[in-house]
Image: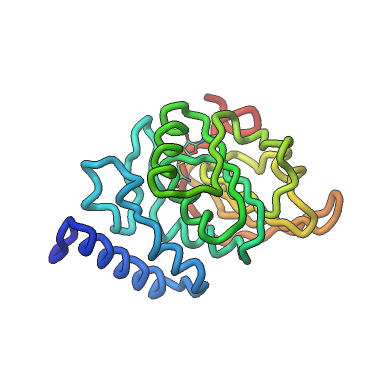
Amino acid sequence: MQPGLSAGPAGFALARRRLVEHLYAGGVRDTRVLAAFEAVPRHLLVPEALRGQAYRDTPLPIGEKQTISAPAVVAAMTEAMELEGHEQVLEIGTGSGYQAAILSQLAARIVSIERIPKLASTSRSALDTLGVTNVIVYLGDGTQGRPQEAPYDRVVVTAGGPEIPRPLLGQLAMGGMLVGPFGPRGKQELVRMRRTGQTRFTREVLGPCQFVDLIGENGWAA
Ligand code: SAM
């Protein structure tokens, strides 16, 4: 646990408050996003042995050689999605379920896809334990999206791919946005794509970043 904080509910709540102050100091201004970080108990989405570190702004291992992203990264991606509350969101890479739990506070429905069976099942149970009812986790290759439930107002990709998977752009609603890390390994850029027409998109680079691999048909080879 962080110095001066107890490992009980009050200690975790205080640690969360400090994390939110840290995110604010780092430039996060969307009050709905900050409230979501205050509400979601990150310590219940990391391995038990790491709970004491859950509110540090750092990625942590979640097993299967994967990580839960650092809170500031999750916050930047979430803020870039400009959610109002009515959206249907597709998340690629459920991992721990943390980003999905944050999104559950900010959008209407989250369809989340994870390729590793163990993580799909632990994140599903963790989200159930938190009482999250508007996230559905599917096991599969997220680089193909989930056309059965398209279109999506927002798509967020939480693993780094060589390029933006085309099926994900095709499943975006008109005016919708995709946010994710793309480019060569170790030199990715966080990119935001906005659909402006049937085959037209605008592209913005939000900054450099580093993510675990997006593996699949339209990602890196396994
Ligand atoms: N959003 C996660 C969280 O809040 O913990 C981030 C987890 S981690 C940075 C990225 C995740 O993407 C890993 O769990 C990995 O297994 C998953 N992943 C990688 N390629 C994938 C694919 N093609 N489809 C679905 N999940 C994928």
Q: Looking at the image, is 130 positioned above or below residue 83?
A: above
Q: Nearer the viewer, residue 188 or 95?
A: 95
Q: Looking at the image, is 161 positioned above or below residue 156?
A: above
Which residue is pictured at 39% across the width and 54% down the height? Answer: 70
Q: Position of residue 177 (x, y in %)?
A: 69, 56
Q: Position of residue 62 (x, y in %)?
A: 34, 38
Which residue is pictured at 34% across the width and 33% down the height? Answer: 63
User: Hey, which quadrant is residue 165 in on the image?
Assistant: top right
- Position of 53 with respect to 141 (left or right) is left
Q: Position of residue 46 (x, y in %)?
A: 32, 44
- Position of 161 with respect to 45 (left or right) is right
User: Hey, which quadrant is residue 217 in on the image?
Assistant: top right
What kind of colouring is applied to the model shown?
rainbow
Q: Nearer the viewer, residue 134 or 143?
A: 134
Q: Position of residue 78 (x, y in %)?
A: 53, 59
In which quadrant is the N terminus drawn?
Answer: bottom left
Q: Looking at the image, is 167 positioned above or below residue 195?
A: above
Which residue is pictured at 77% across the width and 43% down the height? Answer: 170
